[in-house]
Image (tube, helix red, strand yellow):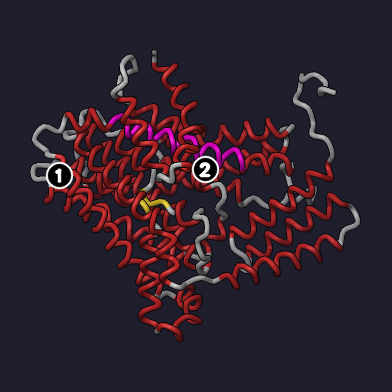
C-alpha cells in the first residue's frame, strides 16, 4: 500500500471509528489513538513518519480557521481583560514555566524541545466545554472569556513556535531581534489577514451558486498560509484575522442586503464543522501511529519517567490556568455575572468555583499534536518530545473530558435564565424587524441587521447570534425556492 492509498484509508476509517467509540462509550481521542497505534503494527503500510511540511501546510490552516470562523470581532471587544489580556499573559507565562519544569524532570533535555513542550502546554482548546452535551449553562462572561483565551493562546504560542523553529535552523536570535520579529509578524499578519478576509467576502458576493461560494471560502486559509509564509508573517494571526473579517462582515452598504446567499452561509457552517472534525480525528490517528516508533527510540528514557513528566506538566498547566482564571473572575464582567450566586456560597467560594470551571474547561489543543509531529528533524530529542506531548494531550483530554460535566454541575454556576432572556430578546427584535418590511427578502435582511446590532451592543452573545441567524437563513432559503444548478450541470432528475 502506498502513501496515497493509506491516506485514503485513514479518511475512510474516521467515520466508523467515531461511531464505534460512541457505541462503546469510549472517549473519541482514546479510540482514535488506539487505532493509530494498531496500524503501526500492521504489515505492508507506509512509514509512520509524517512530513512536517504537510502538517503545517495542509492541516494547520483549516484547523485554525474552522475554530475562528464562528467568532465575531465583538467577542474581543467585550473581553479585552478577561479574554485577551489574560490569554496573552497566561501563554507568556506557561511556555517558559513548562519548559523549565520539563528540563528539571528530564535532565539533559535541550532548551529547544523543552520550549516546544511549553508551546504544547500553552495551546488550549475549549471545544469539549462549549460542545458538551447535557452541560449546564454558565454565565456568558465566562464562556466568552474562555473562547477568546483559546484564540489568543494560539496566536501567541504559534508565534513563539515560529521564532523557535527559526532559531533551530539559523541559530539563537538576540532577544531584541526576536521580540521585534514576533511583534511585526503578529501586527502585519493581522492586517494582511483582515484584508484577505474582506477581499474574500467581496469575491463571495459575486460567486454563485452556493458550492462556488464555499469553494472561495475553502481557499482562504490556504491563501493566508501561503502569504504569511512568503512574507514571514504570523500564520495564526493572519488566518484568525481573515476568519474574523469574514464572520464579522456587515451588510452591503450599497444594496442594503447581505452579500452572500443564505444557502452558502448554511452550507459553510456545516462544511467547516466537518473539516474540523475530520482533520482532528486524522491527527489523533497519526499521533497514535507515530507513538510506537517514538517510544522505541527513547532508549535511556523509561516509560514511567516520560508518563510521569507528562502528568506533572498537566498538573502545572492546570495550576497556572486556575491562578489566572481566579484573577479573571475578579474582573468586572465575570464579577457582575457571579454576583447573584455570592449570597448562596459566599464571594470567595464562588470565585474559586468559577476559576475551577475555567481551568478544567481548557484542555490541550489538537494543534499541539501538529506542533509535536512537525518538530524539525534536526531538533534533538524529537521522539521524546512527541511522546511527552502525546501523553500530555491525550491524558488531559480524556480525564477532563470525562469529568467536565460533573465539574460544572458541582460548581453550581448554571445560568439557564441568561440564555432564555437572550433568546426572548432576540426573538422580539427579529419579529419587529420582519414586521416592518413588506418584501420577504428585505424582511430577512432587516432581521439580520437587527440581530447584528444586538450583538454589537452586547445584548446577546455569539452563540445566540449564530443560532438566530441560522433560523433566519433557513427561512430565507425556503423563500428562495429551488436551488440554482451548477454551471454546466444537466437538468435535475425527475
- Placement of the C terminus among the 4 image quadrants: top right
Give the residue at x 78% y 53%. Answer: 445
**What is the number of the mark on residue 426?**
none
In the image, what residue occupies the spot 47% across and 66% down? 142
Q: In the displayed structure, does residue 387 sit left or right of residue 326?
A: left
Image side of residue 213 versus residue 170, left or right? right
Which residue extends farthest bottom?
A: 343
- Residue sitting farthest toward the front: 24
- Please provide percent x and percent y for residue 239: 49, 42
In-image side of 100 versus 32 (left or right) = left
- Crowding around mark 1 (Cα neighbors within 10 Å: few <14, some 14 to 19, many 20+) is few
Q: Secondary structure at mark 2?
A: helix
Image quarter hosting the N terminus: top left
Query: Residue at the spot x=21%, y=56% of the render?
Result: 97
Residue tagged by mark 2?
Answer: 66
Local packing at callout 2 (Cα closer than 10 Å; few below 14, some 14-19, many 20+) is many
* Residue bearing the label numbered 1: 304
Q: Which span is picked out in magenta?
A: 270-290
Residue 71, x across and y down, in percent: 55, 53
Q: Which residue lies most toward the right here?
A: 438
Q: Is residue 278 magenta?
A: yes
* In magenta segment, residue 285: yes
Residue closer to the observer: 336 or 256: 336
| In this picture, residue 251 sits left or right of residue 136 | right
Position of residue 212 relative to residue 131, above or below, is above
Q: Residue at x 73, y 56 (%)?
A: 448
Dot 1: what SS?
Answer: helix
For the stretch drawn in magenta, what is the main secondary structure?
helix
Instruction: Classify residue 421 by image quadrant.
Output: bottom right
Amino acid at each position: 500500500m502506498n502513501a496515497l492509498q493509506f491516506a485514503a484509508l485513514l479518511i475512510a476509517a474516521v467515520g466508523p471509528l467515531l461511531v464505534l467509540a460512541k457505541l462503546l462509550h469510549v472517549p473519541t481521542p482514546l479510540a482514535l489513538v488506539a487505532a493509530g497505534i494498531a496500524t503501526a503494527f500492521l504489515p505492508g503500510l507506509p512509514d509512520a513518519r509524517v512530513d512536517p511540511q504537510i502538517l503545517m501546510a495542509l492541516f494547520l490552516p483549516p484547523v485554525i480557521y474552522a475554530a475562528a470562523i464562528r467568532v465575531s470581532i465583538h467577542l474581543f471587544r467585550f473581553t479585552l481583560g478577561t479574554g485577551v489580556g489574560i490569554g496573552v499573559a497566561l501563554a507568556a507565562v506557561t511556555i517558559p514555566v513548562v519548559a523549565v519544569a520539563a528540563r528539571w524532570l528530564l535532565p539533559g533535555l535541550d532548551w529547544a524541545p523543552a520550549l516546544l513542550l511549553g508551546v504544547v502546554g500553552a495551546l488550549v482548546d475549549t471545544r469539549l466545554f462549549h460542545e458538551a452535551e447535557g452541560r449546564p449553562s454558565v454565565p456568558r462572561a465566562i464562556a466568552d472569556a474562555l473562547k477568546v483565551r483559546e484564540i489568543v493562546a494560539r496566536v501567541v504560542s504559534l508565534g513563539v513556535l515560529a521564532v523557535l523553529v527559526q532559531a533551530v535552523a539559523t541559530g539563537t536570535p538576540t532577544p531584541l531581534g526576536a521580540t521585534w520579529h514576533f511583534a511585526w509578524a503578529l501586527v502585519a499578519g493581522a492586517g494582511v489577514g483582515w484584508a484577505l478576509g474582506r477581499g474574500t467576502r467581496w469575491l463571495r458576493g459575486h460567486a454563485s451558486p452556493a458550492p462556488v461560494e464555499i469553494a472561495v471560502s475553502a481557499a482562504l486559509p490556504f491563501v493566508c498560509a501561503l502569504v504569511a509564509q512568503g512574507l514571514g508573517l504570523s500564520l495564526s494571526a493572519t488566518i484568525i484575522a481573515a476568519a474574523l473579517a469574514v464572520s464579522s462582515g456587515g451588510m452591503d452598504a450599497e444594496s442594503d442586503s447581505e452579500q452572500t446567499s443564505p444557502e452558502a452561509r448554511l452550507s459553510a457552517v456545516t462544511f467547516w464543522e466537518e473539516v474540523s472534525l475530520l482533520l482532528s480525528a486524522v491527527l489523533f490517528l497519526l499521533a497514535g501511529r507515530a507513538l510506537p516508533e517514538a517510544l522505541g527510540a527513547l532508549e535511556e528514557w523509561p516509560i514511567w519517567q516520560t508518563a510521569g513528566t507528562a502528568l506533572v506538566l498537566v498538573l502545572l498547566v492546570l495550576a497556572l490556568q486556575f491562578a489566572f482564571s481566579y484573577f479573571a473572575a475578579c474582573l468586572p464582567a465575570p464579577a457582575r455575572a457571579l454576583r447573584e450566586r455570592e449570597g448562596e456560597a459566599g464571594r470567595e467560594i464562588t470565585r474559586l468555583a468559577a476559576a475551577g470551571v475555567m481551568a478544567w474547561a481548557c484542555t490541550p489543543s489538537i494543534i499541539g499534536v501538529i506542533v509535536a509531529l512537525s518538530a524539525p528533524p534536526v531538533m534533538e530529542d524529537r521522539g521524546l518530545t512527541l511522546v511527552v506531548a502525546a501523553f500530555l494531550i491525550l491524558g488531559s483530554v480524556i480525564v477532563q473530558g470525562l469529568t467536565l460535566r460533573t465539574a460544572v454541575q458541582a460548581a453550581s454556576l448554571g445560568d439557564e435564565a441568561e440564555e432564555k432572556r437572550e433568546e426572548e430578546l432576540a426573538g422580539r427584535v427579529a419579529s419587529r424587524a420582519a414586521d416592518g418590511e413588506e418584501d420577504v427578502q428585505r424582511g430577512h435582511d432587516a432581521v439580520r441587521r437587527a440581530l447584528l446590532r444586538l450583538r454589537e451592543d452586547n445584548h446577546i452573545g455569539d452563540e445566540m447570534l449564530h443560532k438566530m441567524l441560522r433560523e433566519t437563513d433557513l427561512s430565507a432559503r425556503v423563500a428562495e425556492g429551488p436551488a440554482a444548478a451548477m454551471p454546466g450541470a444537466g437538468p435535475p432528475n425527475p
